[in-house]
Image (spheres, grey):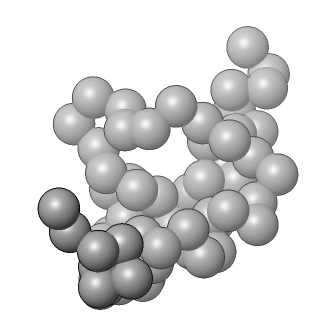
Amino acid sequence: MTNPKEITLTQPAPRRLACSRCGTEFGCDLSGQCWCAEETAKLPMPVKGEDCLCRECLRKAAAEAAQT
C-alpha cells in the first residue's frame, strides 16, 4: 500500500491559448487560479468547435447570452 505522505501532487502547467473567437493569446492556469474564475460571467464550455475565450470575448458572449 502506498504511504499517503509519499504522494506528490503536481499541478498542471499553465497553457498558452488563442481565443477561439478573436485570436488574442492568453494564459490558462488549470490549477483553478485562472483569471476566468474571477469573472462573474459563466458559460458552458466548450461550445462546439471552440476552446476558452479571452476575457473580452467571454464578457461579450455572456452579454449576448443574457439578451436571449
Give the residue displayed 68% in from the left and 41% down from the top.
42
Q: Is residue 10 above or below residue 30?
A: below
Q: Quadrant of residue 7?
A: bottom left
Nearest the eye: 11 or 35? 11
Which image quarter holds the C terminus? top right
Residue 48: x and y in percent read: 27, 29
Q: Residue at x 76, y 39 (%)?
A: 63
Query: In the visual, does 45 lie left or right of 14?
Result: right
Left or right of 39: which side holds 46?
Answer: left
Return the residue found at the far front: 1
- From the top left corner, tell me how far across and down residue 4 is, in percent: 36, 72
Residue at the outermost top position: 68
Locate the N terminus and report the quarter of the image it occupies. bottom left
- Compared to 38, does 27 lie above or below? below
Residue 65 lies in quadrant: top right
Judge left or right: residue 38 versus residue 1.
Answer: right
Outermost residue on the left side: it is 1
Q: Position of residue 10 (x, y in %)?
A: 31, 83
Up-down relation of residue 55 to residue 27 (above or below): above
Q: In the depicted view, which residue is nearer to us: 32 or 20?
A: 32
Q: Position of residue 35 (x, y in %)?
A: 64, 74
Whether residue 9 is visible, yes or no, is: no
* Residue located 29% across and 74% down the image: 3
Residue 19 visible in rendering = yes
Q: Is residue 40 left or right of residue 42?
A: right
Give whichever of 63, 5 is nearer the camera.
Answer: 5
Check the image and report above or below for 4 versus 5. above
Residue found 22% across the figure and 36% down from its top: 49
Count of numbered badges drawn on the protein: 0
